[in-house]
Amino acid sequence: MEYRRKSPAVKRIMQEASELQKDPSNDYTAAPLEENIFEWHFTLRGPVETEFEGGRYHGRILLPNEYPFKPPEVILLTPNGRFELNTKICLSITGYHPEFWQPAWGVRTVMLGLLGFFPTKSNGAIGGIDFTVKERKKLATLSRQWKCPTCNVDNLTLLPDATDEDPHGTPAEIDMPQFTLNYRKDTPESSPNASNATPDPSSDDTKQSQVPTTTTVAQNTEILSNPTVPSQIPVSLPPQPLPSSSPPSSTPPRGHSTRILDLMIVAVAALLMAFIENMTIKIVPLGAGQDVGRSCILVTVGGKNVMLDCGMHMSYNDERRFPDFTYISRTGQFNDVLDCVIISHFHLDHCGALPFFTEMCGYDGPLYMTAPTKTVAAYNLEDYRKIQVERKGDTNFFTSSMIKACLRKVTSVNLHETIHVDDELTICAYYAGHVLGAAMFYISANGESLVYTGDYNMTPDRHLGAAWIDKLRPDVLITESTYATTIRESKRARERDFLKKVQSCIDRGGKVLIPVFALGRAQELCILIESYWERHHLTVPVYSPVGMAATATQIYKQYISWTNEKIKDTFVDHNMFEFKHLKAWDRNLVDNPGPMVVFASPGMLNAGTALEIFKKWAPDPKNMIIMPGWCSPGTVGARVLKGEKQINVDAFTRIDVNLTVANLSFSAHADAKGIVNLIQQLEPKHVVLVHGEQHQMDYLKPKIYSELGIPCYNPPNGTTISIETSLDMDVDVEGALMKQWLLQGQEQHAHAHLSALRGEKRSCNELDLKVKVEDKQAVQGILDDTERSLAYLNKKQAIGTMYPLDGIPVQGIIMMDKDSRDQKPKIVSPEHLSEVLSLPQHDLIFSVDKPLDTQRLVQRAIASGILAEKEASLIQPDHINFGRYALDLLYLDLVHTLPHLLNQSKTSLSIKSITITPRNSTLLMTWHYRDETLALRILAAIARL
């Protein structure tokens, strides 16, 4: 059997097989089949102190192609009275509950979990049965001789009974054949699809349904080139872990309560591994993956599931119109899977499916958007509903009451306000500048972070400001890429060109159609037309949709704080949204003679007033249509921009296109330069491109990696990428703190940080710190002082001097100044931080009272010669100075290992910050937390007194 060399599943399976052979368990045995490593066979020892005790139970584990990111299936083959045979059983560790599965779990976890589930009740779970205790005991006896036809070995041979020589019942030595795996070369001819590269573990009668493809992305994955791989690499897989060479042990078998405790420990450890060592952010586009339309991104951050946007595709009226929500839950249990839903702005390709998802699919969990987005979304959704239902007769659509019910569930968020969704998940909104109320969102949970931009604009316009966000340094940035291959000309040049084209058309008596969405670009262009008409005293009529001007004035007045500074400063004296040259459009005006300018929605000509006007005006070459934004493929607007001269709108309508077509990009999306500027501002560890055409993404993706050094991905719809994260960060270390650290006089710390001075990466607690010394001039002095310290250390170590090598040499605090230019973290001394924050100095001191065994103390004092035996017999016990003798004995114990650190007086003994004073029949010991390791050793010496 051939397998892909780079397959994460193959690597993980081989690793687990090797570990099970090196460290086998006495409770079970498990190994992959020779002909298919995705199918394992196992044998379990029945849990002790239960009706299954003495039984041996054989079964199969089917690992999916996406293992370990998706759970395995478990099938029992031996009759047992708890689980059905040849049936995939339903447990929290199997494929029936993928939401509980963690990638850090493995075959060992499954085995321990299965052992724990044996003594429990089935409670109607799939594959569960409840035989009587008597029946189960009888089956346990019969199971010992049961033989698997595939393995051809009986259960008792695989897991023998315990004997006096072998209390654990070590598996017998069985000759199992070794086999070789030939890896498939990763070439186009060998199909990169994982389903073709690995055998299907579910090819039996219980075959699983198709699931989204999963792609694993390691933290340092090379994304530009693949190394050359030999086509055939023989790898010897370890045999099944049946034999054990461990020596017999006298430890008695553990009881059932102890086993359950072990299972709990394993489960907790596995969860910690999943959240700490293998922290992973998962991203799957349900829409807008290598496409524009129905934006919907499902992300898992810190174990929290968040859905970003819930849009519709304007080009389709079939099942492709809405995202495929079955990727979230096949059973519709969205409330159980999702922790929250976030909407970035009010455009329908980002919020159009929201009423369908909440009212028809049943999602009732947390839902967040800004207040302007909530207000305008109500207008947009209702307007589109009227077009689809009342004009086109679409019966499978949400109603007005559904829209209102949906928006009642929304929680409005303010800019820069941190929202605590729960104790672990927080979100924060930042200004996006795309349309009124558009926001980028920062999402953080359990040490992982992500920024989702939605649509944004990095340059200001006539009524909105430019996008702005803090230097957040997230693990992942998900950014739109609509104009990933475009660098726009100046805004002034576009505006001049737009006005020239409008003027030329009306000069020849033509009519100008400008398709726009009701709010957003419409206001930008209306402001431009209004000021131009005012300056040139033009009288040509300009029309806009009924109520658009009034609605815009009302909404922009309500949310004036979201506009740019010029609008806010002049709003009281001169409301720029009160257009005196704009008149309300009436459909009876479409055949009026003479020039006119009409703003009509929607902006993609896919329906509504804009399409009706276009049908009338398109055949006349005097007329003009100006498309100010991007159009989804398949819409009438996109076909017009392609230059088609005949357009079939439906089976009964064909339009002859003779009018002039102009495309001037007033779309408020970031261009390639703006995308790069945002990445440089945020400094993410990974970038994911969405909301763009594939060829545009393919152009920008290598540019981001080659010029910024950041891995970049562009997954298609339905494909999951898993990005490993860590708690690493780069910090600067204060020069004075570094000098104090190096001169502490501890050899291993001196060596470690001498290496750090040369740029090597060292470990500090749970953070990997790449150290950079500020005070360059002090480096040579530090090195000289350290050399002298090392010479002294080496000399003292030769005579057995004891040092707490694993103690904390100095106290440093990680600080980041938000007012600084680069906002880079820095490790500083507490004194420096106190100066910056004007805080009082503080310290941390421990103390403990150790009682003395007075009888033993006197015996040791006599044995060491501190107290004469005759003298001891003459002194009354109440008059013996136990404290003095204790200090003397402690001094004798420590003087050989700490000669230069001990300082003894009549009433106390001091070692560095540690002070020991006698109090009656106890010793009081205090110490600074930095000397904690040394203090523990001295406490051990006191215990020996």
Image: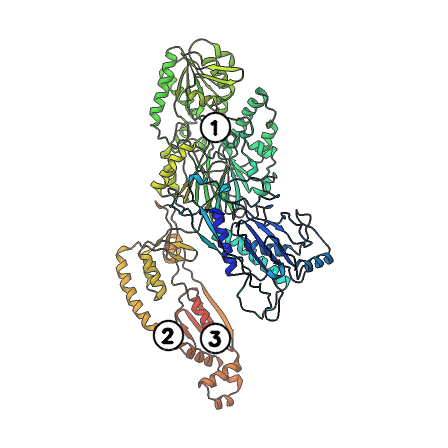
Residue 577, picture quadrant: top left
Q: Are marks 3 and 2 in contact (CB under 8 Å)?
A: no
> Is residue 830 placed above or below 910 in the rendered structure?
above
Picture coordinates of residue 746 (x, y %)?
36, 66
Tell me which amino acid carries mark 3: Ile
Q: Relative to the observer, which residue lies in front, 278 or 498?
A: 278
Residue 179 lies, in percent from the top left, at 49, 54
Q: Residues within 10 Å of mark 3 (few under 14, many from 20)?
A: some
Q: Amino acid at mark 1?
A: Lys
Q: Is residue 877 left or right of residue 690?
A: right
Foreground pick, 820 / 596: 596
Residue 726 x/y as whole percent: 44, 50
> What is the CA distance from the residue labelled 1 to the residue labelled 2?
80 Å
User: Tag 3, which secondary structure?
Assistant: helix
Query: In 3D space, how far apart are the residues under numbered discs 3 and 2 (Cα atoms)?
Result: 20 Å
Marks 1 and 2: CB-CB under 8 Å? no
User: Which residue, given by chain and number where applicable, does mark 1 sit on?
Assistant: 557
Residue beneath disc 3: 942
Read off the residue under disc 2. 800
In 3D space, how far apart are the residues under numbered discs 1 and 3 (Cα atoms)? 77 Å
Residue occupying the point 37% across, 37% down: 676
Q: Say which of 839 and 371 sits in front.
A: 371
The quadrant in which residue 733 appears is: bottom left
Sequence order check: which comes first, mark 3 or mark 2? 2
Which badge, 1 or 3, is on the more N-terminal residue?
1
Of marks 1 and 2, which one's residue comes earlier in the chain?
1
Pointers 1 and 3 in contact (C-beta within 8 Å)? no
Q: Residue furthest top?
A: 593
